Image: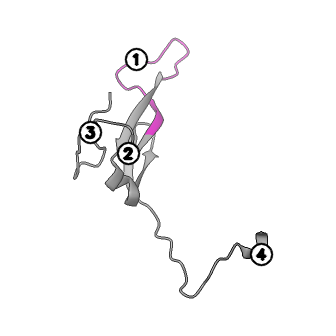
């Protein structure tokens, strides 16, 4: 169960899902032995980034069992560009 922000530097408690972002990853379950077919069992793991952290960070799967926090790419908008919708009306 998700209790806190996945960012270890934040750890804000999860009270409501109205802010932030939930991530779901399919990972190998190292706690369970391989089945008769030799395949490792898999399970879904849920992570949450709070609203503040999810604005600048994201989570990605690192290997079969790990999760990594990465910075979101910064999108820069050129100055002087004007978008108008008057031509569409």
Observer-side mark, 3 or 2, equals 2
- Residue ID for mark 1: 33
Observer-side mark, 4 or 3, equals 4
Examine the structure image and report whether residue 26 is included in the region drawn in magenta.
Answer: yes
Q: Give coordinates of residue 67: x percent, y percent.
A: 39, 44
For the point 32% across and 32% down, the residue is 2
Give left or right: position of 52 versus 9.
right
Q: Is residue 57 above or below residue 31?
A: below
Q: Are marks 4 and 1 in contact (CB under 8 Å)?
A: no
Extreme residue toward the top, this view: 36
Q: Give coordinates of residue 64: x percent, y percent.
A: 45, 37
Q: Give coordinates of residue 46: x percent, y percent.
A: 40, 33
Q: Is residue 12 above or below residue 34?
A: below
Reading the chain from its start, which is encountered first: label 2 or label 4? 2
* Predominant SS along the magenta part: loop
Give left or right: position of 81 versus 3.
right
Query: How far, Cα to Cα, is label 4 from label 1?
Result: 63 Å
Reading the chain from its start, which is encountered first: label 1 or label 3? 3
- Residue ID for mark 4: 87
**Badge 3, how many Cα within 10 Å: few under 14, some, many 20+?**
some
For the point 57% across and 88% down, the residue is 80
- Residue ID for mark 2: 19
Observer-side mark, 1 or 3, equals 3
Reading the chain from its start, which is encountered first: label 3 or label 2? 3
Q: Are marks 4 and 3 in contact (CB under 8 Å)?
A: no
User: What is the span of residues highlighted in magenta in the rendered image?
Assistant: 23-40
Query: How far, Cα to Cα, is label 4 from label 3?
Result: 47 Å
Reading the chain from its start, which is encountered first: label 4 or label 3? 3
Q: Secondary structure at mark 4?
A: helix
Query: How far, Cα to Cα, is label 1 from label 3?
Result: 29 Å
């Amino acid at each position: 169960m998700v209790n806190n922000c996945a960012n270890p530097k934040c750890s804000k408690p999860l009270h409501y899902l109205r802010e932030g972002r939930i991530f779901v990853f399919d990972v190998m379950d190292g706690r369970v032995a391989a089945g008769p077919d030799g395949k490792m069992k898999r399970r879904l793991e849920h992570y949450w980034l709070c609203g503040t952290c999810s604005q600048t960070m994201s989570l990605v799967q690192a290997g079969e069992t790990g999760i990594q926090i990465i910075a979101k790419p910064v999108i820069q908008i050129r100055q002087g560009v004007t978008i108008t919708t008057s031509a569409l009306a």
